[in-house]
Amino acid sequence: MEHPIFEIENLSYTYKDKMETTPALKNINLKIDKGDFVALVGPNGSGKTTLIKLILGVIKPQKGEISINGKSLRNFNAWQEVGYVSQKSNSFSKGFPATVREVVLSGLTKEKGLFKRFNRNDGKKLDDVLKLLNISDLKEKNISLLSGGQTQRVFIARALISNPSILVLDEPTVGIDAKHVKEFYDVLLTLKEKSVTILLVTHDIGVVVDHADEVACLNEHLHFHGTNHEFKNLGEAELSKIYGFPLQLVSHDHERECCS
Ligand SMILES: Nc1ncnc2c1ncn2[C@@H]1O[C@H](COP(=O)(O)OP(=O)(O)OP(=O)(O)O)[C@@H](O)[C@H]1O
Ligand SMILES: [Mg+2]
C-alpha cells in the first residue's frame, strides 16, 4: 500500500518568547495522498505558514508527528523531491546580488550539493523552466531589479527546476497579474497530470474552487478538510464560522472570492 505523502498527527505548535506565548496550531490531523492538489485556506494569522514551516522542518513540532512518504520528518532527507516557494521570497530578494539564472539554478543545489558545477543538462533545465514561467528574457537580470510579480515567478521557477514530486507553495501568486496567475495555474495542472503532489496556501477562494481537488480550512484548528465540491457546499454561514468573522463572498461567473 502506498503511504500518504504527508501525514500529520495531533500536531500543535505555540510560539514562545520572553514576552508572550502565541498558540498557532492545535491538534492538527491531516493526510495528503500522492498526486493530490490540496488548497490550504484560512484567515490571516490562522497558522498556515506555521504548518508549512513545520512540514518542511524549518521549525520543530512541540507535540505531534509529521511524516513524509511514510518516513518520520526526523529521518526524512529526500529534500530534492520537495519544491518550495515561501511567502516571503519576494521581500528576501531585495538587495540580493544575484542574477535570475543564479537564483533559479540554486534550486538544483539540494541534489547537486553546494559546490558542484552546473553542466549543459542543468542549462537545459534552466531554459525550460524559464520558458515555462515566461521569464526567459530576464535570465541575466539582477533579481533585485525585477518587479514584484517577476520576482515571484523567478522563485516559482527555482522551486520547479529540480522537477520535484512534491510542491509546497505559500501564497505564490501574490503580486502576479491575472494573465500570469492563469499561466501559473495551467503549469500546476500540468504538474498534477504528472502526479506531483501540491499543497498550496492561498486566499484566492475562486481559484481553490476551480482547481484544487481538496480544501483544508485552518484557523488554529483544522476546521474542515474535504473535496472542493464539499467545500463549495459549505455555505457562507459555515465558512464565516470557520473564519471567525462574516465572510463576504462575491460571485462573478462561477468564481467566489473571499476577503481575508
Ligand atoms: N516567529 C513568530 N513568533 C511569534 N509569533 C509568530 C511567529 N510567526 C507567526 N506567529 C504568530 O502565529 C500565528 C500564526 O501565524 P502564521 O504566519 O502561521 O499565519 P498565516 O495563516 O500564515 O497568516 P497569513 O495569511 O497572514 O500569512 C499568528 O498569530 C502569528 O502572529
Ligand atoms: Mg502565511
Image: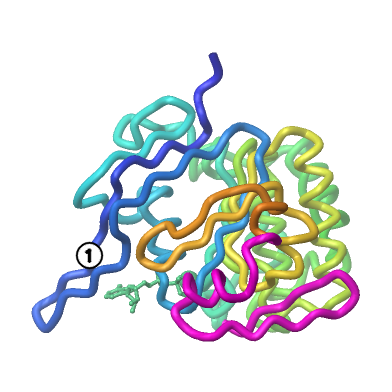
Q: Which amino acid type corresponds to the residue marked 1 in the rendered image?
A: Thr
Residue drawn at 70 percent across, 47 percent down: 213
Q: Which residue is mark 1?
A: 14
Q: Which residue occupies the extreme top position in the image?
A: 1
Q: Is residue 99 left or right of residue 222?
A: right
Q: Quadrant of residue 196?
A: top right
In the image, 187 versus 102, the foreground residue is 187
Residue 177, horizontal then vertical, whole percent:
81, 79
**Which contiguous range is marked in magenta?**
232-260
Is 250 placed above or below 197 here?
below
Q: Is residue 166 left or right of residue 130?
A: left
Residue 105 visible? The answer is no
Residue drawn at 48 percent across, 74 percent down: 241
Q: Quadrant of ligand 1?
A: bottom left
In the image, 153 versus 238, the foreground residue is 238
Q: Dot 1: within a 10 Å radius of its alpha carbon, few (fewer than 14), some, or many (20 or more) residues?
A: some
Residue 224 visible? The answer is yes
Is 222 placed above or below 56 here?
below
In the image, 43 versus 75, the foreground residue is 43
Asked if residue 240 lies in the magenta stretch, the reply is yes
**How many numbered marks have been drawn onto this rendered protein structure?**
1
Asked if residue 19 lies in the magenta stretch, the reply is no
